[in-house]
Amino acid sequence: MTSMTGRIPTTHTGSLARPPELRDMLLARARKQPVDAAALNAAASKAVADVVREQCKIGLDIINDGEQSKTGFALYVRDRLSGFEGESVRRAMSLEGREFPSLVGNLVPIQIAQPCTGPLKWKDFGAVERDIAVLKAATANVEHRQVFMNAVSPGTFINFNPNRYYASQDEYVAVVVETMRREYEAIAAVGFILQIDSPDLAQRSYNYPDLSTEQWRKVVAENVDAINQATRTIPREQIRVHVCWGANEGPHNHDTELKDVVHELIRLRAAAISIVAANGRHEHEWRIWETVKLPDGMSLIPGVIDSTTNIIEHPQVVADRLIRYGRILGRERIIAGVDCGFGTIVVERPKVDPAVAWAKLRSLVEGAQLASRSLWGER
């Protein structure tokens, strides 16, 4: 990824709300109901073309397919891989859920996992190839735009699909790394930026609520190693990693502090790291970058739009956030982003209204323009 000349580039995290027809087919498929595959693929292709067109109309610089064909940012692998034939299980309740039980099932999600109960193998790698072909076609005549595509990280894959088959956790991790490597390499091979979606690098409360901070840091270090291993053949310049604490509007008062994991995050072999920076639990963490140096060749994508609320940020608020990061890290090393996706999992009614989400992205672009004028106008 390269910075734009004389201004701050803009992007988002990946998922955007699906149109009703596509949403209903994806939900039906998730419920094991019959769905016409040709109709689903056609609806997904149209949705991708529409979201690409809208992203360009708004003025986003680094765009994607909105993850239109996927049931969820991590759940999609179950549709494409064998090895998940067993019953789903409920995971340990998060620390937020334990403290605020009245919010469970609403603002605090119930964690459901689908264990791996057999050998992991691609049964429909064609779905990956279709996603790539559809996005390539939709962006064929798009000028002055960079294109990215999302894929789930090895660590998040394992959190959603715990091992019940392989002889050891190390063996399972190695298999997941090599399995997902095929998808990562296919995305990069066509020239897209690969975004690894990796909430596993931050979500202790949801994934390992009973670990100490030191134990948790060890997990984060192992997951960083897994990403680096799985992307080892891909040029660093084509990789960015999204790190977050979940897309829900919960309390988040047990979120891991960025300072506790930042030194692991900057070990990522990536051109950019996308982090949460707009919501009320994490906005203060800009201060970390006053003492932590980004490695050479790495940029930061701070979320300057909160993806959990229907409040549309004023462009000046967006600009102020970006100016703060630009003055600390250098104006060429920041990309304006969003805290998380607007449609991370397909639901009947997104928490952020789709029309509002697009308005928030317009504010993102306007705010980046204001910040650019300020930062490049300084003497």
Image (cartoon, rainbow, N blue to C red):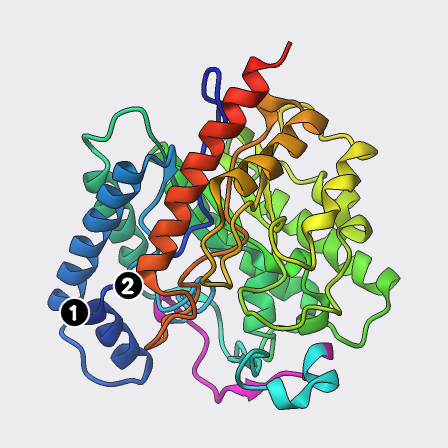
Give yes or no for contact between labels 1 and 2 (Cβ–Cβ under 8 Å): no
Q: Quadrant of residue 42?
A: bottom left
Compared to residue 201, the image places residue 111 above or below, namely below
Compared to residue 368, the image places residue 311 above or below, namely below
In-front residue for pair 64/317: 317
Query: Does the magenta-highlighted stretch encompass residue 89?
Result: yes
Q: Along the horizontal axis of the image, is 39 left or right of 378?
A: left
Label ID, residue 18:
2
**Which residues fall within the magenta stretch?**
79-95
Quick one: quadrant of the C terminus? top right
Q: Along the horizontal axis of the image, is 60 left or right of 20?
A: right
Q: Quadrant of residue 146?
A: top left
In-front residue for pair 133/71: 71
| Crowd class of label 1 (few under 14; some 14 to 19; many from 20; radius 10 Å) | few
Viewer can see residue 270: no
The amino acid on which the numbered mark 1 sits, given as a three-letter code, is Ala
**Residue 347 placement (x, y as % from top left):** 36, 75
Label ID, residue 290:
none
Label ID, residue 37:
1
Which element is circle 2 on?
loop
